[in-house]
Image (cartoon, rainbow, N blue to C red):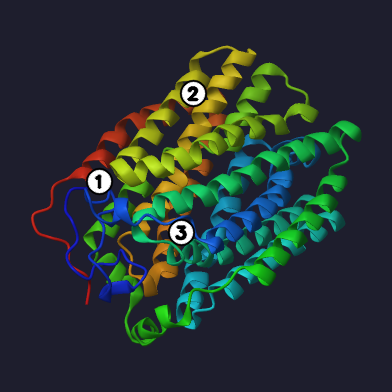
Amino acid sequence: MRDRPGPGTPGSPNGPSGPEGEDPGAPPPEGGRGRGRRRRVDRNVKLLGVNSLLTDVSSESVNSVLPLYLRNVMGMSPQAYGIFEGVYQGMSALLRIAGGKVADRTQKHKEVAGAGYALSAATKIGLLASSTVAPTTGFLFLDRMGKGIRSAPRDALISLSSQPENLGRSFGVHRALDTIGALLGPILAFALLWYAPDAFDSVFVVSFCVALLGLGVLFLFVQNPPKERLDAARSRVLTKRPARELLANRAFRRILVAGALLSLVTVSDAFIYLIYQDRTDMQSTSFPLLFVGTALAYLLLAVPLGRLSDRIGRAPVFIAGHVMLIGCYLVLRTSGSGLLTAIVMLGLLGTYYAATDGVLMAMASAVIPAELRSSGLAWLTTVIVGAKLAASVVFGRLWQWWTPDTAVSYFLVGMLVALPVAFFILFRPSTRPEVPAE
């Protein structure tokens, strides 16, 4: 994005009264604070990363067995699973905005995030008590609601604990720690199922115990941002209309539209893994290892790509990530069923996430005022998740009506069309400078 915000733009932890904001797609100015005063990643960010690591060990150990559990044990069809997958991911969107608003109004980001983490942990006990589709999906939806409550306040804590020029690196470090959990969770599930095949209850029990450890890290060690940083902004949050103010920000609108457009043609991980498993007749015990491959690539690249986005601009890295996703679709659609196919496919998928997940949050954080950081990130993630909900429902129907390969082909064509449009949206020259909404 070439238009640079004017003075007082949200790009600083100090909000609209802080230094000049950063353009979300641009690197730090030459010779400026991005070089001479670069700080290390804040302790709060690292602790939030540890919390997310433990939480992801808990959640991903369950998520890595869910596709097989729901299809093989609960008997869901591809179309039913597509609807479930879309709603499952979309449930978090229902409370992202509410969680963000509560955190912004109360300035208790840690406490709001903690409530979401606690709800997700409690659902693991519910899964142990359920044996039919209705209560099982109900508890899974509650888990996603917990994720919705915690996501925006947590990301706001990260951004408010970081210097503007280090946002990409901070989110990269957090996502890297988060991804270690996403790597260890499926390995844990694999080990448990290898020891006791089809003993899904053991996965749920261990998941609950690890989730409690994550809650302990959050409540005992993570701190809210300094009070003096947020007091000046609080009265403004209570009197302004955050949604109108955010949508009046042209840079934020561009990020919102581009992200939603690309999400509409994104195939969920679970479908990619199920297609590969059907093609290769992979044993259910080994299925969680597909999640491990993606998480490993993400882990290796999250920090380097986050730092690269701070240097060359976040929008170019974000676009490049979706090029990797196109490569993943091509491999899934045209290649065979050997080990090399799996390695390349999972490597491309992990690279896509490393180049887009934290980078998108950093790109948006650079243009959202500090006092609206939770609400702004909540709006962004809500729109993205809503678009992915629609994508999962459509993909499931295409699979049910025709074949998995046909469904992948439709989404591949869709991504080839959407990517140039998103590129134009993010890099289109502006006719006037961005100014902060009043």
Q: Is residue 26 left or right of residue 66?
A: left
Circle 2 packing at 10 Å, graded few (<14), some (14-19), many (20+), is: some
Residue underneath mark 2: 406
Q: Secondary structure at mark 3?
A: helix
Vertical arrangement, residue 222 with respect to residue 438, above or below: above
Q: Position of residue 315 (x, y in %)?
A: 31, 44
Q: Is residue 382 left or right of residue 403?
A: left
Whether residue 394 is visible, yes or no, is no
> Seen from this angle, which residue lies furthest right?
196
Residue at the image position 63 percent from the left and 63 percent from the top: 146
Q: CA distance from mark 3 to mark 1?
A: 19 Å
Q: Secondary structure at mark 2?
A: helix
| Front residue of this view, candidates 362 and 386 | 362
Residue at the image position 9 percent from the left and 59 percent from the top: 432
Whether residue 381 is visible, yes or no, is yes
Query: Which numbered mark, 1 or 2, is in the foreground of this view?
Result: 1
Query: Which numbered mark, 3 or 1, is in the foreground of this view?
Result: 1
Q: Position of residue 248 (x, y in %)?
A: 24, 67
Numbered tag placed on residue 426 in the rendering: 1
| Front residue of this view, candidates 76 and 319 | 319
Q: Secondary structure at mark 1?
A: helix
Q: Position of residue 322 (x, y in %)?
A: 39, 34
The three-letter code of the residue at mark 3 reads: Thr
Q: Which corner quadrant holds the C terminus?
A: bottom left
Circle 1 packing at 10 Å, graded few (<14), some (14-19), many (20+), is: many
Numbered tag placed on residue 369 in the rendering: none
